[in-house]
């Protein structure tokens, strides 16, 4: 009887938590997504949850819901790998090598600034300077107990500033004529059945092998393998991906609980310094790579910029700056990050020891724990 009461309470509690968190995600993320703000879903979800966190209301996801979100994002990330992308990347081997070297240099410089000037811990600095793959970074940073609020501010501020400044720097009115949206192939039922079955199986294997963020990495590896081999050709619909991103943004925003506005201001200032240094390195190396590759410095700068792939491709189309070159380099860096981040995470930061789970502050819709049978009897 006691077990049944406890199970019923947990189900009701999880349903209330999930319902409230989903409401926060929708209210913050979907408006920015509909306005076509790059990364708007995750930024909006983060902002909405952060506002509540500053007011003392922490938005929480039940464990099972969070695992489903991670799995969805894993499948979507793996779908970016395709035989065509791999073939196109082979057409610019020197430029791809410069991309790897330039990315390592700007990440190293950003990491050094965060560690020495900002006194940020190693895990947080490592994930804060990753130039892309934001959703992957968030999941791994959460798993490794990094300061997710700092990671979120540094990452999203870089995205927002680059999106705002890139058209101005490269030419006035660059975004005045939006390009037509690319045609996506969402896949047939057979492809989805294969992807889902492989993802479920891969989660079990990843957990058995003690992968960090097994619920994300398992589906990502399974999806990437199936797409790279040409066995499936499917992608997660943008609306579903935006919803998952908004929900993941809520996870970041909840970490702002307890932060003072003065702390946030100092973090924003530090993030801008990191952005200027990383952006300058990307621009210099990118301009050189574009020049020696025959596509021009503008295409090189857009290809190496640590920003949104959608915006950079739109700018490349506007300036007639070899959009294929820009797209291939962004996808190559994205795939490189997907491959290296989990490996480096495991090598640099061994799995943290299990700690007693802290009791999180109650959300606005959480009820107190049900009284025990002994309390009722008293």
Image (cartoon, rainbow, N blue to C red):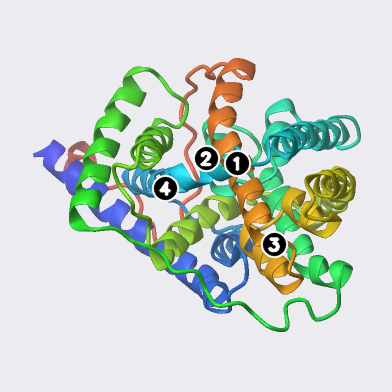
Residue 86's disc is 2
Q: Position of residue 20 (x, y in %)?
A: 40, 64
Q: Quadrant of the N terminus?
A: top left
Q: Position of residue 321 (x, y in %)?
A: 75, 63
Give me the residue at 77% from left, 76% from top: 174
The crowd level at tag 2 (other Cα within 10 Å; few <14, some 14-19, many 20+) is some
- Label 3 belongs to which residue? 312
Q: CA distance from mark 2 to mark 4?
A: 13 Å
Closer to the N terminus: mark 3 or mark 4?
4
Quarter occupied by residue 150: top right
Q: Quadrant of the C terminus?
A: top left
- Label 4 belongs to which residue? 79
Give me the residue at 43% from left, 34% from top: 217
Which structural element holds mark 3?
A: helix
Give me the residue at 70% from left, 50% from top: 155
Residue 89's disc is 1
Horizontal side of 95 relative to 170 (left or right) equals: left
Q: CA distance from mark 3 to mark 4?
A: 20 Å
Disc number lying in front (4 or 1): 1
Disc number lying in front (2 or 4): 2
Give me the residue at 60% from left, 62% from top: 39
Quarter occupied by residue 159: bottom right
The crowd level at tag 3 (other Cα within 10 Å; few <14, some 14-19, many 20+) is many
């Amino acid at each position: 009887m006691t077990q049944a009461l406890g199970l019923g309470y947990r189900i009701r509690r999880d349903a209330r938590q999930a319902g409230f968190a989903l409401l926060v995600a929708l209210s913050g993320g979907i408006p920015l997504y509909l306005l076509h703000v790059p990364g708007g879903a995750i930024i909006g979800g983060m902002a909405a949850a952060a506002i509540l966190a500053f007011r003392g209301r922490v938005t929480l996801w039940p464990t099972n819901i969070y695992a489903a979100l991670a799995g969805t994002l894993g499948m979507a990330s793996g779908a970016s790998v395709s035989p065509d992308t791999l073939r196109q990347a082979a057409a610019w081997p020197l430029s791809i090598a410069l991309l790897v070297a330039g990315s390592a240099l700007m990440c190293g410089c950003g990491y050094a600034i965060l560690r020495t000037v900002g006194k940020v811990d190693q895990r947080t600095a490592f994930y804060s300077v990753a130039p892309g793959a934001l959703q992957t970074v968030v999941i791994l940073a959460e798993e490794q107990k990094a300061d997710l609020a700092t990671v979120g501010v540094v990452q999203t501020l870089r995205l927002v500033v680059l999106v705002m400044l890139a058209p101005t720097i490269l030419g006035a009115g660059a975004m005045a004529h939006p390009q037509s949206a690319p045609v996506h192939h969402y896949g047939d039922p057979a492809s989805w059945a294969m992807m889902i079955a492989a993802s479920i199986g891969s989660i079990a294997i990843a957990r058995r092998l003690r992968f960090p963020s097994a619920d994300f990495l398992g589906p990502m590896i399974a999806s990437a393998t199936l797409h790279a081999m040409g066995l499936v050709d499917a992608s997660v619909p943008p609306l579903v991906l935006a919803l998952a991103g908004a929900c993941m943004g809520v996870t970041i925003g909840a970490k702002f609980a307890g932060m003072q506005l003065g702390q946030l201001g100092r973090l924003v200032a530090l993030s801008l310094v990191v952005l200027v240094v990383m952006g300058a390195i990307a621009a210099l190396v990118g301009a050189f790579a574009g020049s020696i590759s025959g596509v021009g410095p503008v295409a090189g700068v857009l290809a190496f910029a640590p920003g949104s792939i959608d915006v950079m491709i739109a700018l490349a189309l506007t300036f007639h700056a070899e959009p294929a070159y820009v797209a291939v380099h962004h996808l190559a860096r994205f795939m490189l990050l997907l491959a290296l981040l989990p490996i480096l995470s495991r090598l640099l930061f061994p799995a943290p020891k299990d700690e007693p789970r802290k009791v999180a502050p109650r959300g606005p819709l959480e009820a107190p724990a049900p009284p025990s049978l002994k309390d009722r009897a008293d």
